[in-house]
Amino acid sequence: MPRPILATVHSAALRHNLDRARRAALDSRVWAVVKANAYGHGIERVFEAFRAADGFALLDLAEAERVRALGWRGPVLLLEGVFDPRDLELCSRLDLWHTVHCDAQIDMLAAHKTQAPQRVFLKMNSGMNRLGFAPERFRSAWTRLNALPQVDEISLMTHFSDADGERGIAHQVEVFERATQDLPGERSIANSAATLRHAARTRNDWVRPGILLYGGVPDFPEHDAEHWQLQPAMTLATRLIGVQTLKADDTIGYGSSFRAEGPLRIGVAAVGYADGYPRHCSTGTPVLVNGVRTRMVGRVSMDMITVDLTPVPDAGIGAEVTLWGRSSKGALLPIDEVAQAGGTVGYELMCAVAPRVPIAAD
Ligand SMILES: *Cc1c(COP(=O)(O)O)cnc(C)c1O
């Protein structure tokens, strides 16, 4: 028998969350952001649910090829654009739209031989200071692109640093709007947090939600999944493979980091950091056993964790352990809570599920 660990991708939740993005931005078209292999869920596994999106946005050319191989004929956008002049040939062959964020990419386009002009998304650095043209250089980049026979329609995009937090987006929206006010073209500015929190107040021809489609909450813990009506699209579950009964002063696992204050029944679950469960999670991280909330105790090992069975005295070997997502009885454990306990974000946990974990879809 294989190890009992399993990740399950919930198609109904993916559909629900995509619909949620649509309702948050009724006047916008929706890019389903499926970079990083659909945030760890698998492009092929999310494809049917996301067919209802207006396009797929990603950044790996091999992933763009996979979306086309699935039969998708609609828009596909490369969020970081091309990395090499040869990538433009693939853009022509597969009809990929691509971001242009620097002069080197315009140079590549100017040298590209093609019959069919390409659709591009010109990116402004409005304050994130990662990719994009500075606001004062944006217009000249647009003019240069617009003069190229290789270029068809030009859309305008930017990305927010604080859509999920207190600083918000107003300062970047102002920079973006001032520098683009008399330029034609569609606009794309909102990630998940901006779509949920700010979409109603910005012009967005295309929103770009990622994490929300998978049921992750972009502004956790200020808000939770219930607040935004999001459903978890991934469950990571395993089973107990051992039980130990501790006496007062007994310790658990490497480094004896946990010491029992009194008699304590603990379960040993078949999941560890080699499965992608974060090693930074320590005693107190929430976990469900047979759908009942309890806590992890001691350190995360490569292949095992230990959990407090006090709230589930009947649980023994074979009991269901839910690391995040939904138990078979319907109890929820938000990935955001587990991530917070490990000092990270739900994004990282989804993307880090290890190759040795089998994934099913329901
Ligand atoms: C990843 C990404 C998104 C989606 O971000 P979420 O926070 O997951 O919604 C949107 N736009 C760009 C440019 C991205 O790289």
Image (cartoon, rainbow, N blue to C red):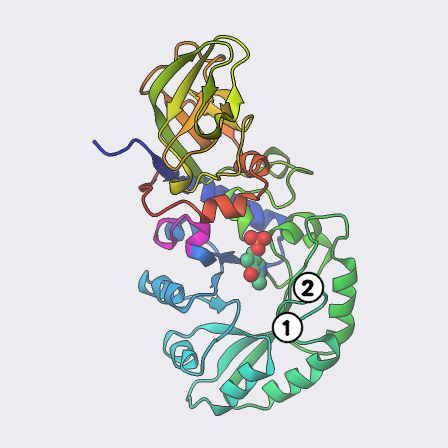
Name the side, left or right, on which 270 lies relative to 196. Answer: left
Residue 238 quadrant: top left
Is 40 part of what is drawn in magenta?
yes
Q: Is residue 246 above or below residue 24?
A: above
At a point 59% along the width and 91% down the height, the residue shown is 147
CA distance separating discs 1 and 2: 9 Å
Q: Relative to the observer, which residue lies in front, 8 or 285? A: 285
Q: Classify mark 1: helix, strand or loop.
A: loop
Disc number for residue 132: 1
Q: How many marks?
A: 2
Q: Are marks 1 and 2 in contact (CB under 8 Å)?
A: yes
Number of other residues with Cα within 10 Å of mark 2, as a class: few under 14, some 14 to 19, many 20 or more: some
Task: Quadrant for the N terminus, please.
Answer: top left
Magenta part, dominant SS = helix
Q: Which residues are magenta?
A: 37-45
* Residue in view at x 60 percent, y 51 percent: 192
How would you rate the neighbour count of disc 1 (Cα within 10 Å): few for under 14, some for 14-19, many for 20 or more?
many
Q: What x and y, as percent, mark residue 200? A: 70, 53
Residue named by callout 2: 128
Q: In the rendering, at what x and y percent does residue 124 appear? A: 66, 72
The quadrant holding residue 3 is: top left
What kind of residue is marked 2?
Met
- Residue 105 vs 265, above or below: the answer is below
* Foreground residue among 19 and 66: 66
Amino acid on which disc 1 is placed: Gly
Q: Residue at x 64, y 58 (%)?
A: 190
